[in-house]
């Protein structure tokens, strides 16, 4: 099942997926797994967010593509962009910073199972097929 969240401007922003491992079968074959962020700590955890847009803003604002209602996040905290099949994260001058695998970063390319910490919120990145 796929549930899509729509913003005020009626544009598709975030897709929450319930089967992130792509285990649903079609004619005996598995579907391709999407790239996604798994919310493991913070409001709403656990939750899976498919990275299906060329750019995704993560923050507490309703205008963020991926909204997490936490006072520890800036309104626009993190930008996730797709470049040549890879995902790059960039801190948007957030109040609490962005930590990748425990190291404070400004920007970095994500690898499978990387941990992103944004204040009290923690995501794990999962590469798709």
Image: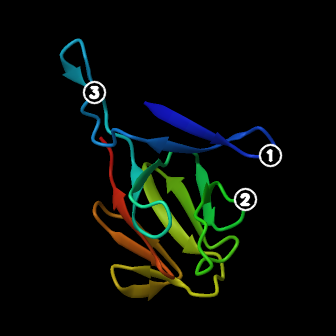
Q: Residue visible at 73% across and 39% down?
A: 11
Residue pointed to by mark 1 = 8
Residue 50 image position (x, y, % from top left): 46, 46
Chain-order first, disc 1 or disc 3: 1
Q: Secondary structure at mark 2?
A: loop
Q: Earlier in the sequence, mark 3 or mark 2?
A: 3
Evaluate if marks 3 and 2 touch, with contact meaning CB atoms under 8 Å apart. no
- The residue most toward the left is 28
Residue 27 position (above or below residue 102)? above
Q: Which residue is mark 2?
A: 62
Q: What residue is shown with label 3?
A: 24
Q: Which mark is residue 93?
A: none
Q: Is 92 left, or right, of 29 in this rendering? A: right
Q: Quadrant of residue 5?
A: top right
Q: Nearer the viewer, residue 87 or 61?
A: 61
Q: CA distance from mark 1 to mark 3?
A: 32 Å
């Amino acid at each position: 099942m796929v549930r899509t969240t729509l913003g005020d401007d009626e544009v598709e922003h975030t897709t929450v997926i319930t089967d992130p491992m792509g285990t649903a079968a079609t004619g005996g074959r598995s579907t391709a797994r999407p790239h996604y962020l798994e919310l493991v700590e913070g409001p709403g955890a656990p939750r899976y967010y498919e990275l299906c847009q060329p750019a995704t803003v993560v923050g507490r604002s309703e205008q963020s593509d991926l909204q997490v209602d936490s006072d520890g996040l800036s309104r626009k905290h993190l930008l996730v962009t797709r470049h040549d099949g890879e995902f790059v994260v960039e801190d948007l001058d957030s109040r609490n910073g962005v930590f990748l695998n425990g190291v404070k970063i400004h920007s970095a390319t994500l690898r499978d199972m990387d941990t992103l910490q944004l204040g009290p919120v923690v995501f794990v990145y999962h590469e798709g097929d």
